[in-house]
């Protein structure tokens, strides 16, 4: 499994925290930027990551901005992307089990570092149930 991570300036510190923690656990993870806290436009980074995930079907993405919403909206414009704003354990599990989300978005202004890391780990470990859910995913 290959993981790609990106953020905007608001999510920069949380992105780096998640990135470093996943690297320590020997995940194959690539940081797509930004590489400073300088103000950036989140749609650029969301699209860059979403296009990468779209080309690498078995990979996962992590996007971090202030709320997680802007990144999800921008990423979901790319074909075959299912980005989910995750804010608690249950919605994170369901985003994978039922929706086969391939990108998790997290809000750095709304989620603690520890919770964000926990949600990312749950997202990466949870498998899609398939079955009736696959039929629905195909309709997106």
Image (spheres, helix red, strand yellow):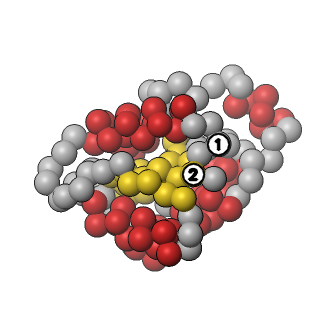
Which percent across, then down, holds residue 120?
A: 54, 63
Q: Residue furthest right?
A: 131
Is the residue marked by circle 2 packed among few (<14), some (14-19), or many (20+) residues within 10 Å? Answer: some
Q: Is residue 73 visible?
A: no
Rendered location of residue 140, percent (x, y): 63, 25
Q: Nearer the viewer, residue 6 or 43?
A: 6
Question: For this view, does 43 lie left or right of residue 126?
Answer: left
The relative height of residue 22 versus residue 69 in the rendered view (above or below) is below
6 or 135, which is in the foreground? Answer: 6
Q: Provide the residue designation for mark 1.
A: 58
Residue sitting at x 57%, y 37%: 56
Q: Picture quarter containing residue 136? A: top right
How packed mark 1 is, by other alpha carbons closer than 10 Å (few <14, some 14-19, many 20 or more), is few
User: Is any atom of residue 131 visible in this view?
Assistant: yes
| Residue 2: image tag | 2
Q: How many marks?
A: 2
């Amino acid at each position: 499994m290959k993981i790609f991570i990106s953020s905007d300036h608001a999510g920069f510190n949380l992105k780096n925290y998640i990135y470093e923690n996943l690297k320590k656990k020997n995940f194959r993870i690539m940081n797509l930027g930004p590489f400073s806290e300088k103000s950036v436009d989140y749609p650029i980074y969301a699209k860059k990551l979403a296009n990468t995930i779209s080309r690498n079907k078995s990979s996962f993405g992590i996007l971090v901005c202030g709320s997680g919403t802007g990144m999800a909206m921008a990423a979901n414009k790319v074909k075959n992307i299912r980005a989910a704003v995750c804010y608690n354990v249950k919605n994170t599990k369901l985003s994978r089990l039922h929706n086969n989300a391939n990108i998790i978005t997290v809000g750095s202004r709304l989620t603690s570092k520890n919770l964000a890391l926990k949600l990312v780990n749950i997202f990466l470990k949870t498998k899609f149930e398939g079955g009736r859910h696959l039929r629905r995913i195909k309709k997106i």
